[in-house]
């Protein structure tokens, strides 16, 4: 975790910027040697707000239940399933963030989460071989090979970016806010 020293107002509250970077890689190898996932959370932290933490804890429990424990609360269950199938290490990064989130000096009020995939040298070589063997013969094949050279494989690729911002923090709740709508009809089966 790195505190940048930057400050701004979010939802009428003073915040400071902290960047949390979590790297998940193969045990015994560096990220560059074995590939992996890098999750970066750029967060603007306000004062400790127990109400926001209670809401975040509820959301996390709810989404974990819906997604059989994946904990990827920023997306639908279908999207989370696709993400975790393609990048299984994301789940470990999310678990680590949830575990270490209590150590933050404040409540995240504005967060941008970025997830990058890092390819191992073997994965880079496989991708280069696939690109160099593609295309076939003739003018079409030559054109395809020339186009692929422009898009040389890169060791890092953006998987997703997810912004989340608290717009307002209110502590007063009226009875009308919690009332069952007048036109609500319960259907028992």
Image: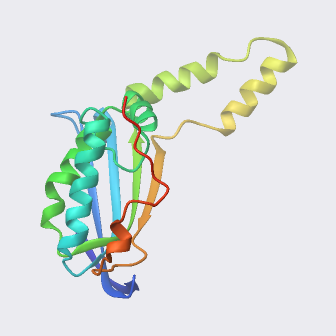
Q: Position of residue 167 (x, y in %)?
A: 43, 75
Number of disc labels: 0
Q: Quadrant of the C terminus?
A: top left
User: Position of 40 compared to 49: left or right?
Assistant: right
Q: Position of residue 63 (x, y in %)?
A: 30, 44
* Residue drawn at x 32%, y 77% as measured from the top left: 174
* Residue drawn at x 34%, y 79% as measured from the top left: 169
User: Position of 30 compared to 174: left or right?
Assistant: left
Q: Quadrant of residue 151?
A: top right
Q: Is residue 175 above or below residue 95?
A: below
Q: Is residue 32 above or below residue 57?
A: above
Residue reaching furthest top?
137
Q: Quadrant of the N terminus?
A: bottom left
Q: Position of residue 182 (x, y in %)?
A: 46, 60
Q: Quadrant of residue 6?
A: bottom left
User: Position of 86 compared to 51: left or right?
Assistant: right
């Amino acid at each position: 975790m790195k505190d940048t020293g930057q400050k701004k107002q979010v939802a009428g509250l003073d915040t400071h910027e902290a960047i949390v970077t979590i790297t998940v890689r193969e045990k015994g190898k560096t990220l560059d040697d074995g590939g992996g996932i890098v999750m970066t959370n750029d967060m603007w932290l306000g004062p400790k707000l127990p109400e926001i933490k209670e809401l975040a804890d509820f959301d996390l429990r709810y989404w974990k239940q819906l997604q059989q424990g994946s904990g990827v609360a920023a997306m639908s269950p279908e999207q989370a399933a696709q993400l975790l199938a393609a990048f299984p290490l994301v789940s470990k990064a999310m678990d680590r963030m949830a575990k270490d989130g209590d150590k933050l000096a404040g409540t995240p009020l504005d967060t941008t989460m970025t997830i990058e995939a890092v390819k191992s040298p073997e994965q880079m070589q496989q991708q280069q071989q696939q690109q160099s063997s593609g295309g076939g013969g003739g003018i079409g094949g030559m054109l395809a090979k020339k186009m692929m050279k422009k898009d040389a494989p890169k060791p890092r690729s953006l998987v997703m970016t997810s912004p989340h911002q608290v717009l307002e923090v209110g502590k007063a709740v009226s009875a009308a806010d919690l009332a069952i709508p007048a036109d609500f009809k319960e259907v028992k089966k």
